[in-house]
Amino acid sequence: MKLPKILSGMAVGALMMLSQVATAQFEGQISMNIYNYSDGVQTDTEMLNLYTTQERILIKGEDVINISDGMMEASGILIRSDMKDFVIMMGEKEALRFTKEELEGMFSMISMMSGGVSETESNIDADYRYTNEVKTIQGLNTTELRIENDEDSNKYLSIWLTNDLDIDWGMLSEPWNNVPSSFSGEVNQMTQEFKSKNFPMLIEVTERGKTTTLFEVTKVKKSRIAKDMVEMPEGLELMSLQQMMMKAMMSN
């Protein structure tokens, strides 16, 4: 074989390898801070870690994670695309496991029990637009998505998004059925964001020239530890949605 053909083949192979690296899904740890405020004063900070692999995502806090306005507390939330389920870890010995279809079925049952009465959605008009502003956060390029309230021009929300992190959100990027109308708009918006694969690195609120930080990514690290973190702990007892509801009814 002639040398030019060998070099051409090596060049094609190198390009294929580079393209695979460029589109490879991120595997590792992303650390985040969530800042809580009361009357404009920061009260405390919650720290979260997101461990992601090609088929699983674990969201784990330094403390317990409040779900549904404090109705449930969890030490971690595991999304398993390979098993098509969600696992909410409630301490070291017990976990709630359910599929997307089971959760949609529970939405439908709640709607039937309430007589199918539709709840009123918010009528606040918001304007979503990308600006020309850019930032480098944790070494990643971000662009600003600005959300403005048409009724108050002095206040807006800035979400700094990067597409340099390729994370497969699995079931979270799929449409949801039977979602109550009171928060269907938010669910649909989140689904679209998960589809776009834009990851928020920083969220800020600016009001009358003053900026308040709500959320920021503090560390992005490729690491093999993520593969260990997304495995189910040994000896964990799994509970279904039906079992959880029966347990809640019996405890009342």
Image (spheres, rainbow, N blue to C red):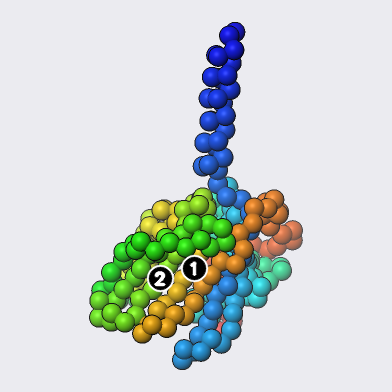
- For the question of whether residue 166 can be seen, the reply is yes
Q: Which residue is mark 1?
A: 202
Q: Are marks 1 and 2 in contact (CB under 8 Å)?
A: yes
When the figure is inspected, residue 206 is found, relative to residue 160, above or below; the finding is below
Q: Nearer the viewer, residue 77 or 154?
A: 154
- The crowd level at tag 2 (other Cα within 10 Å; few <14, some 14-19, many 20+) is many
Please identify the residue farthest to the front as the structure is shown. Answer: 4
Q: Quarter-wise, where is residue 3 in the image?
A: top right
Indicate the position of residue 187 as horizontal and vertical percent values: 39, 65
User: On residue 158, which mark appears?
Assistant: 2
**Residue at image location 35% in from the left, 68% down from the top:** 146
- With 204 as the anchor, is 236 left or right in this view? right
- With 134 as the anchor, is 77 left or right in this view? right
Q: Marks 1/2: CA distance?
A: 8 Å
User: On residue 84, which mark appears?
Assistant: none
**Residue at image location 38% in from the left, 82% down from the top:** 209
